[in-house]
Image (tube, rainbow, N blue to C red):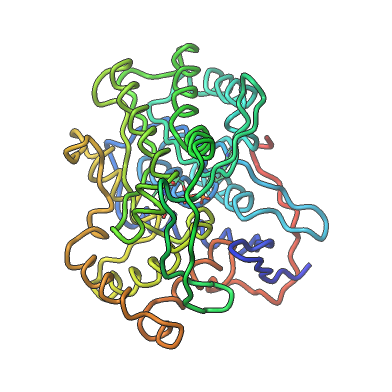
Amino acid sequence: MIVAPKIRGFICTTAHPEGCAANVRSQIDYVKGRGPLPHSPKKVLVIGASTGYGLASRIVPAFGGGAATIGVFFEKPGIENKTASAGWYNSVAFEEAAAEAGLYAKSFNGDAFSKEIKEAVIRAIQADLGQVDCIVYSLASPRRTDPETGEVYKSVLKPIGQSYSQKNLNTDTAEVNSISIDPASDEEIAHTVKVMGGEDWELWLDALADAGALADGFTTVAYSYIGPDLTYPIYTNGTIGRAKEHLEESAARMNSRFGAGTAYVSVNKALVTQASSAIPVVPLYISLLYKVMKEAGLHEGCIEQIQRLFADHLASGGAPSLDEKGRVRIDDWEMRADIQAAVASAWETVTTENLSSDSDFSGYKKEFLRLFGFGLEGVDYEAETNPEKALPSGL
Ligand code: NAI
């Protein structure tokens, strides 16, 4: 079939196999170009490994550090006349490149919240690697089925306490309008914490510890976001922020249990991913941020961010540098006072009319399409392609 983008709101329902592969290869090339990471962990489990920050977190230790990797994700394989989801093609391309480079790579496509996937992953670790020395937790999910009770929890992106009105971008029509969101109920807050908090991260570590699958001196990291005052009501002080607070509490609990310096929360930069494009207000903020950071020569994507996370913190050969709350801050360039001042001032004046000149909305759109394998150089988008691509590890 010939594959073209089909955008529905903040999701693209098609993905291009060769385009996704080109995207993965360019990330691998970037990492190889940065030189080896001699202190990289060597046996890495990435939960949420197929797109965004998790995919980058698989590529960096593999191609910078020569690590064996196990990836867990929830993606759809392609069938005749229907493409797979982008994360499926990304993972196929990752595994192919890993095999070419002689690197161990196994993938598990299924629900990371379930006991079954945890057990299957642990069996593979025990059979193939013995133990893992780094666990990256990079899930972004709208729902979670509790493995004990079967109850389904749904996360919401809402403010807490009072409603929130702010400028917003309709990414379909390129209109700057405004949005007003009612506050979350107590139940919605609790559900969001259940889905996006640290409970499942801890369950993974419990299961790995019980199975003796954690190497001495292992580390684990999960990702968070803080961002500017203007998104505080919908992010940091909203339901998702509550979940991220819980993630930090989980890290503290794991540090008490496994030893200080085992569990980290890394605060990352706002970037276009499938997860972030669903958050109100954030696409407009990202469009303004990209323009300011590109002009300042400070722009990074997921791969540059995670390369820096490993090179400067997790695989530097020393302890990571932490903020006053014990977090790694690779959002440091985003949060620089000059960058934030420029974005805040652009925020005041941005309108539908000046969106294309005063923001990097065109960069936002290009990057959104790239997530699904569209707009990559060297890919023939007019050519027939087979949507069915098998994962080499066959799982
Ligand atoms: P993403 O949407 O690109 O990736 C999510 C990953 O989770 C995918 O691999 C997906 O297959 C997997 N996944 C979702 N549900 C699953 C399930 N039930 N079982 C197994 N795998 C599942 O998201 P992104 O943006 O990379 O987010 C990853 C983490 O980074 C999240 O915790 C997010 O809050 C955090 N973060 C994201 C930022 C951003 O701007 N995108 C900024 C800072 C932190």
Q: Residue at x 43, y 63 (%)?
A: 165
For residue 276, above or below residue 392: below
The residue lying furthest to the front in this view is 162
Q: Inspect this view and state whether residue 12 appears.
A: yes
Query: Who's the residue at 41% across and 82% down the image?
Result: 351
Residue in the image at 44% along x and 88% along y: 353
Report the number of discs: 0
Image quadrant where residue 133 sits? top left
- Say left or right for 3 vs 256: right
Q: Where on the picture, by quarter, is residue 249?
A: top left
Of the 4 image quadrants, the one containing the C terminus is: top right
Q: Nearer the viewer, residue 38 or 150?
A: 150
Can you give x and y, in whole percent of width and height, for residue 184 in the image?
Answer: 49, 45
Residue pictured at 19% horizontal, 33% vertical: 319
Looking at the image, residue 387 lies above or below residue 167: above
Q: Residue furthest right?
A: 80
Nearer-the-camera pick, 339 or 38: 339
Quarter of image, res 348 = bottom left
Q: Position of residue 289 (x, y in %)?
A: 33, 68
Q: Is residue 203 left or right of residue 17?
A: left
